[in-house]
Amino acid sequence: MTEPLRSIERRFPGVPTLEGAGVRLRRSFSNNEIPLFDPFLLLDRFGSTNPEDYLAGFPWHPHRGIETVTYVLDGRVEHGDTLGNSGVIGSGDVQWMNSGSGIIHQEMPQRSEGGMSGFQLWVNLPAREKMSIPAYRGLSAGEIPEVSTDTGNRVKVVAGNFERVEGPVRGISVDPTYLDVRVPPGGEFELPTAPGYTVFSHTIDGSGTFAGADSAPVAPGETALFGAGGAVRVRASDAGHRFLLVSGRPLHEPVAWYGPIVMNTQSELRSAVRELQSGEFIKHQRPILEE
Ligand code: FE2
C-alpha cells in the first residue's frame, strides 16, 4: 500500500522580528509553536538590501542544548566561537553548529553589495545529548552536492538523501533532511518522507502548489507545515519554485526555553543562568573539528 501524500496542515507567514543587536528578520516559527515542529525549534529568515537592517549582527552570546544551522543564500557572515573556530560563512555555505553543553559565539553579517539573505534553523538535541561536547561543521558551497534531475529540478542536499545522494551533515540523532530545491516553471517534485517525521517547507522564490487538501499556492516567505503521510509532492507555478524542504524525527521530550538556551526542565535553565553568571558555563574550550 502506498502512503498518502502529505497535505499542508498549517501555514506561517513569518513575523517581523528584531533580534541580536538589532537585526530585522522574519521569524517563521519559534517557542509559541511548540511542539508543532518538534524536533525543530525556530526558523528565522534574514534578508535585506539595506545594511542598517543587518550590520548590528549577533554579538557574543551563549547557546546550550541545541544545534544552530545557518545557511547563507547571499552575503557574508563572520563568526567566531569559544571552540576556537572563526571564519566567514559565504553565499551557499552552511554552518551546522552543535552547541551541546555550551558555546559562546558571535555571528556578524558583513556589508554586501547585492544584499544579505539566509536562514537560521534551530534543531533540538535529545535530552541525553544536551550536555554533550560542542561540535562545529563549516561546509562551503562546493561541499554541498547538487542533484540535477532529468525533469529539470536542481536539489542541494545539506542533510539527508535525495536520489541516493547523501548530504555531508551526518550522524545527527533526529535524522534531519535539509534540501534547497529548485523546480522549473510548471515542473513537479516529489520526495518520500519517513512516516511520523515532521516535515515543513519554506518558499524562497516563485510559488508552487502542494498535493493534498490545501491546494492554494505557497508564496515567498511562507512556511508550510505538512500533516501525516509518506511523501511530499509539489507542482511549480509559471514562475518556478525554490524552497527549503526540511524533515526530522520528533523527540517528544519536554522543552524548557530561555532565549538561546533550550533544555528539558526549568531547573536545567536555572543552572545554565547561574553558570553564565559565575563563569562556569563553558565546559569545553579546545577546538573540536568534525570531518
Ligand atoms: Fe547564535
Image (cartoon, rainbow, N blue to C red):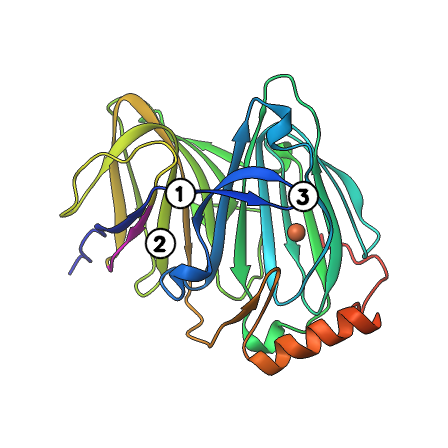
- How much space separates mark 3 and mark 2, taking CA atoms? 31 Å
Marked residue nearer the N-terminal end (3 or 2)? 3
- How much space separates mark 1 and mark 3, taking CA atoms? 20 Å
The residue singled out by tag 1 in the image is: 14
Q: Position of residue 101 (x, y in %)?
A: 70, 70
Residue 280 in view? no
Marked residue nearer the N-terminal end (2 or 1)? 1
- In this view, the mark in front (2 or 1): 1
- How much space separates mark 2 and mark 1, taking CA atoms? 17 Å
Marked residue nearer the N-terminal end (1 or 3)? 1
The residue singled out by tag 3 in the image is: 21
**Residue at position x 54%, y 27% from top?**
48
Please, what secondary structure does the residue beneath circle 3 have?
loop
Task: Examine the structure image and report whether residue 227 is included in the region drawn in magenta.
Answer: yes
Tell me whether circle 1 and circle 3 mark residues in contact (CB < 8 Å).
Answer: no
Front-lying residue, 83 or 194? 83
Tell me where the magenta segment starts and ends, as one range. 224-228
Q: Position of residue 5 (x, y in %)?
A: 20, 51
Front-lying residue, 65 or 168? 65
The residue singled out by tag 2 in the image is: 199
- The answer to which image quadrant residue 230 occupies is bottom left
